[in-house]
Image: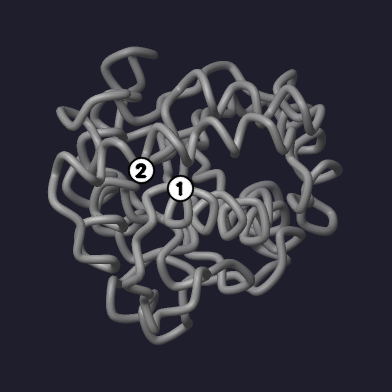
């Protein structure tokens, strides 16, 4: 992990706990569609998947129904203004310290870029980041691998000098598919077993460990 310059963070489950906001928005969309089918999977296990996949695979919607549900979801999500979302403990201080250490910070998220930027702005995190790469509003760019590739292209990041930090297996696998190493965080929505199976270069249990690992790796060993 020498010569790292760029840190690419996932958003939900890595920087913020958005489970309540996402859960309320999914319920609003399901109710608005008068859809009776409910998923047995907890909201936390769904977070990180594209909304289109959630509504199709977890609730059995057709493509047409899923796109209508996404519109309802986004309408409600926007109206909540981050009600129910919290920044994980120590994250603000860690981001500030990483910036002061000379790293450039970016976001790669399955949220559409405009929505992710609003979340960061509302939670007063946006100033820490040099760029935000999100999913497209349509279905063309929605899996994590393509979003990470989009971040690398858009911000002209060298994979050899960049690392992905996320809480789900798709963050780790998506990074590897783009030639990046990845750090898995266990305090988010993905299980430790899920992350271990994806084979990150490191696992951390607290955001402070990200700082120790990247700024003072000898002390973190």
Which quadrant: the C terminus?
bottom right
From the image, tell me which residue sits under label 1.
32
Q: Is residue 179 visible?
A: no
Residue at 81% of width from left, 27% of height from top? Answer: 124
Disc nearest the viewer among 2 and 1: 1
Q: Gap between marks 2 and 1, in whole Å? A: 8 Å
**Number of numbered markers:** 2
Question: Does dot 1 land on a helix, a strand or a loop?
Answer: helix
Q: Nearer the viewer, residue 106 or 220?
A: 106
- Left or right, residue 91 beside residue 142: right
Residue 69: image tag: 2
Look at the picture and state if 143 lies above or below 114: below
Q: Nearer the viewer, residue 181 or 146?
A: 146
Snapshot colouring: one colour
- Left or right, residue 115 beside residue 125: left
Residue at 20% of width from left, 65% of height from top? Answer: 60
User: Residue 214: percent from the left, percent from the top?
Assistant: 62, 50
- Left or right, residue 196 beside residue 101: left
Look at the picture and state if 10 lies above or below 60: above
User: Residue 28: percent from the left, percent from the top?
Assistant: 54, 51
Q: Nearer the viewer, residue 209 or 109?
A: 109
Question: Does dot 2 land on a helix, a strand or a loop?
Answer: helix
Look at the picture and state if 76 lies above or below 12: above
């Amino acid at each position: 992990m020498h010569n790292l310059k760029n840190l690419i963070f996932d958003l939900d489950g890595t920087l913020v706990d958005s489970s309540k906001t996402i859960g309320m928005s999914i319920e609003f969309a399901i109710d608005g569609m008068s859809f009776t089918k409910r998923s047995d999977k907890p909201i936390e296990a769904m977070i990180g998947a594209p909304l289109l996949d959630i509504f199709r695979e977890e609730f059995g919607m057709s493509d047409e129904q899923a796109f209508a549900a996404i519109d309802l979801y986004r309408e409600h999500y926007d109206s909540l203004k981050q009600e129910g979302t919290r920044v994980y403990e120590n994250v603000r201080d860690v981001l500030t310290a990483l910036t002061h250490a000379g790293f450039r910070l970016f976001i790669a998220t399955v949220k559409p870029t405009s929505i992710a930027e609003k979340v960061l702005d509302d939670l007063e995190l946006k100033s820490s980041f040099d760029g935000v790469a999100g999913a497209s509003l349509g279905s063309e760019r929605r899996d994590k691998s393509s979003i990470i590739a989009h971040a690398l292209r858009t911000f002209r990041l060298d994979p050899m000098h960049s690392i992905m930090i996320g809480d789900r297996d798709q963050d780790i696998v998506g990074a590897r598919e783009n030639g990046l190493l990845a750090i898995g965080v266990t305090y988010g929505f993905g299980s430790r077993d899920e992350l271990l199976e994806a084979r990150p270069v490191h696992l951390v249990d607290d955001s402070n460990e990200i700082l120790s690992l990247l700024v003072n790796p000898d002390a973190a060993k």
